[in-house]
Image: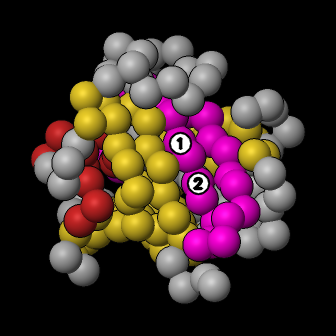
Amino acid sequence: MKQLLAAVVAGLVVAGAGTAQGDAPAKSIDGTYKVLSASFGGKTKEDADKVEFEFKNGTVTVREGGKAKAEDAKYTLDPTKTPGHIDISPPKGDKTVLGIYQTKATKAGLELTLAFTKNGSDRPTDFKTDTPGVTVMKLLRQGEK
């Protein structure tokens, strides 16, 4: 779980719109998300579903059991890129994490998929879950029906 939280804070932030169609980046991803799946360099994290993310006004908060797990991180989105780009700025001056994102409207709500690296590595180019050094997470926005 600590690895999941560290990876997320080190490079997970995004914003989403409720009206996204198909697989596309949204201009805003504000909302609270539950983790559907998480993969770190091809290794699945079984307990990732206990973590939730809140994206709001360019800030992401990570919670486990309703309690914040780390300081908030700042993020910016560039939905003009394909796939959309997300840059996450962790607290305390750590290197900016480069990632990609896409949203998908589903019957269950907005799905947000993120892929990112950490430690100043290059931005991922796809959402493959078996790429070494790349974290891929699929999230579902809560409170939609």
Residue at 48% x, 49% y is 138
Residue at 75% x, 46% y is 23
Point out the image quarter for the C terminus: bottom right
Above or below, 64 relative to 133: below
114 or 43, which is in the foreground? 43
Residues at discs 1 and 2 in contact (Cβ within 8 Å): yes
- Whether residue 123 sits left or right of residue 4 in the image: it is right
- Whether residue 112 sits left or right of residue 82 in the image: it is left
Q: Residue furthest front?
A: 107
Is residue 110 one of those drawn in magenta? Answer: yes
Q: As shown in the figure, which amino acid type bears the numbered disc 1?
A: Leu
Q: Is residue 74 visible?
A: yes
Separation of disc 1 and disc 2 at Cα? 7 Å
Image coordinates of residue 81 in percent, x first then y, are: 81, 32
Is residue 109 one of those drawn in magenta? Answer: yes
Magenta stretch bounds: 90-118
Residue at 85% x, 39% y is 80
Q: Which residue is mark 2?
A: 112
Q: Quadrant of residue 117?
A: top left
Number of marks present in the image shown: 2
Q: As shown in the figure, which amino acid type bears the numbered disc 2?
A: Leu
**Labelled disc at residue 114:** 1
Image coordinates of residue 38 in percent, x first then y, are: 35, 43
